[in-house]
Image (tube, rainbow, N blue to C red):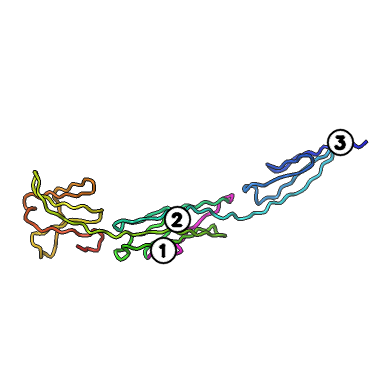
Amino acid sequence: PEQSLTVSLVSGPAGLVVTNGVLAWTPTEAQGPSTNEVLVSVGDGVATVTNALVVVVGEVNALPTLAGVPAQWLVDWRPLELALVAMDEDVPSQRLSFRLVDGPRGMSVTTAGLLSWSPAIAQEATTNLVRFAVTDGEASLTNDFVVTVLARVPPTLTLGRDETGLFLRWTTAAGFRVEQARDMSAPAWTPFTGTVTEEDGTITLRLDGEDVEAWYRLMRDDGGGSP
């Protein structure tokens, strides 16, 4: 009578199995590209024979994965710095390169993915679409996000007196400096060097001695010199 046959795997790549005479294998990313020799045997309980076959795994480039960037809000023209994040699932991983596709004037992106921007005064109260791309040398992906530069509300400088004497006080976001002069028409004003305290966003200047008889002004500390 016909004998029962048993098919077995003698050797082959990791993950390859033979069950009831059926060979099955799903290569991993790390196993491609590769050329693999598979050796199988069949036995009838008395004799065994072997056979070999070759399985070639081709390489398919995997697209990079690109992390999203949430909407950004800038106050007082503060610089924006972001580290863009992407990953490559190929094995070995390919080198990724970033570039800026579209964005406001002055914005830049390094090939390593560092995005930076210092808004100009003219870019106050604007909403800007930013588009950047990443490539692995074969395929590329793009992503968008929005940067809004909020309008600055001019602070109000007030003069007051309490139990410790005269003071100047204002509440504002960062980005202003106080200058003083003995004469309002003086060609050069100097930064205030007296006592300055800050609490909960309120800045207080204590006026003592010669500071009592002086002119004061707030200046935008953005390099533009706008009072």
- Proximity of marks 1 and 3: CB atoms separated by less than 8 Å: no
- The earlier-in-sequence mark between 1 and 3 is 3
Q: Residue drawn at (63%, 55%), measured in percent from left and top? A: 60
> Which residue position is annotated with label 2?
113
> Which residue position is annotated with label 3?
4
- Proximity of marks 2 and 1: CB atoms separated by less than 8 Å: no
C-alpha span from label 1 to label 3: 72 Å
Q: Is residue 194 magenta?
A: no
Task: Specify the quadrant of the image occupied by residue 120.
Answer: bottom left
x then y, percent, for residue 122: 30, 66
x then y, percent, for residue 181: 11, 59
- The earlier-in-sequence mark between 2 and 1 is 1
Point out the stretch of residues depicted in magenta. Answer: 90-104
Local secondary structure at mark 2: loop
Classify mark 1: residues with Cα within 10 Å, few (<14), some (14-19) or many (20+): some
Q: Quadrant of the N terminus?
A: top right
The residue nearer to you, when weighing 130 against 127, is: 127
Task: Specify the quadrant of the image occupied by residue 116.
Answer: bottom left
Q: Residue drawn at (6%, 50%), measured in percent from left and top? A: 209
Classify mark 2: residues with Cα within 10 Å, few (<14), some (14-19) or many (20+): many
Circle nearer the viewer, 3 or 2 = 3
Q: Which mark is residue 103?
A: 1
Return the residue found at the far right: 1
Local secondary structure at mark 3: loop
Return the residue found at the far top: 45
**Callout 2 amino acid:** Gly
The residue nearer to you, when weighing 56 against 16, is: 16
**Callout 1 amino acid:** Gly
- The earlier-in-sequence mark between 3 and 2 is 3
**Callout 3 amino acid:** Ser
